[in-house]
């Protein structure tokens, strides 16, 4: 009964125009969904990319490896990312056109950066982790950090010539249907 009263207050013909507008919106949403689904097959092909990061001859764990090219537009697949494991090995992933991440990178020539954030000089990782735990516990209890208990910022482990996109000397050429395995031995 309530619905009837709501529609009965609309000017004559407004209910039909309102229903017609809803149908147009639904049809447009359907077309957008179909077109978006069709575009998935038009996504660029990626190539499997793996590698290893060494620093002064030793494997580096938990480093971020970034391959970037062109205007560095992530939606266009111009950035591929990977994280190193305990042996320094990585595998790249690319994010394409609003879709899920896909394995590999699009073929092309890339600038490469390798970055790892570590505790500041004079502080071990164990000391830093203990300080993080203390800060987290204080925050959970609603305490304010006393002076001197602030968490110091992490610092970059590698020189800018490896870790900065504006200064990197590292490059990689990802090729179609080839073994795209890269080793970066940083000094």
Image: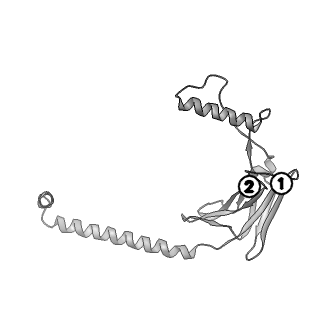
Q: Residues within 10 Å of mark 2 (few under 14, many from 20)?
A: some
| Pointer 1 residue | 54
Q: Does residue 120 appear left or right of residue 32 in this picture?
A: right
Q: State the residue in front, 168 or 101.
A: 101
Task: Please provide percent x and percent y for residue 173.
Answer: 77, 68
For image coordinates 12% across by 61% down, the residue present is: 4
Establish if 61 lies above or below 48: above
Which residue position is annotated with label 2? 85
The residue positioned 23% from the left and 68% from the top of the image is: 19
- 76 to 134, vertically: above or below: below
Q: Secondary structure at mark 1?
A: strand
Contact (CB < 8 A) between labels 2 and 1? no
Q: Nearer the viewer, residue 139 or 44?
A: 139
**Residue 163 in the image: x percent, y percent?**
76, 50
Q: Position of residue 14 (x, y in %)?
A: 17, 64
Q: Circle 1: is it few (<14), some (14-19), or many (20+) Cα within 10 Å?
A: some
Q: Is residue 187 above or below residue 37?
A: above
Q: Nearer the viewer, mark 2 or mark 1?
A: 2
Q: Residue furthest top?
A: 147
Q: Quadrant of residue 146?
A: top right
In this rendering, does residue 166 appear at all?
A: no
Q: Which mark is residue 102?
A: none
**Horizontal arrangement in the rendering, residue 95 relative to residue 3 (left or right):** right
In x, y percent, where is residue 54? 83, 54
Which quadrant holds the N terminus?
A: bottom left
Report how many numbered discs are placed on residues in the image: 2
Identify the image quadrant of residue 27. bottom left
Q: Is residue 14 visible?
A: yes
Mark 2–mark 1 distance (CA, rounded to whole Å) = 11 Å
Q: Earlier in the sequence, mark 2 or mark 1?
A: 1
Q: Secondary structure at mark 2?
A: loop
Instruction: Please name the residue shown 62% across and 73% down the image.
Output: 44
């Amino acid at each position: 009964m309530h619905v009837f009263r709501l529609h009965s207050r609309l000017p004559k013909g407004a209910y039909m125009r309102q229903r017609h507008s809803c149908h147009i919106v639904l049809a447009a949403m359907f077309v957008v969904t179909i077109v978006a689904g069709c575009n998935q097959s038009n996504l660029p092909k990626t190539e499997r990319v793996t590698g290893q990061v060494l620093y002064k001859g030793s494997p580096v764990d938990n480093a971020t490896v970034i391959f970037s090219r062109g205007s560095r537009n992530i939606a266009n697949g111009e950035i591929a990312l990977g994280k190193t494991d305990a042996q320094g090995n990585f595998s790249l992933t690319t994010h394409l056109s609003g879709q899920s991440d896909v394995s590999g990178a699009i073929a092309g020539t890339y600038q490469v950066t390798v970055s790892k954030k570590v505790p500041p000089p004079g502080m071990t990782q164990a000391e830093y982790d203990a300080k993080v735990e203390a800060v987290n516990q204080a925050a959970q209890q609603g305490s304010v950090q006393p002076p001197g208990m602030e968490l110091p910022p992490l610092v970059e482990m590698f020189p800018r010539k490896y870790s900065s996109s504006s200064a990197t000397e590292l490059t990689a050429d990802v090729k179609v249907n080839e073994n795209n395995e890269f080793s970066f031995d940083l000094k």
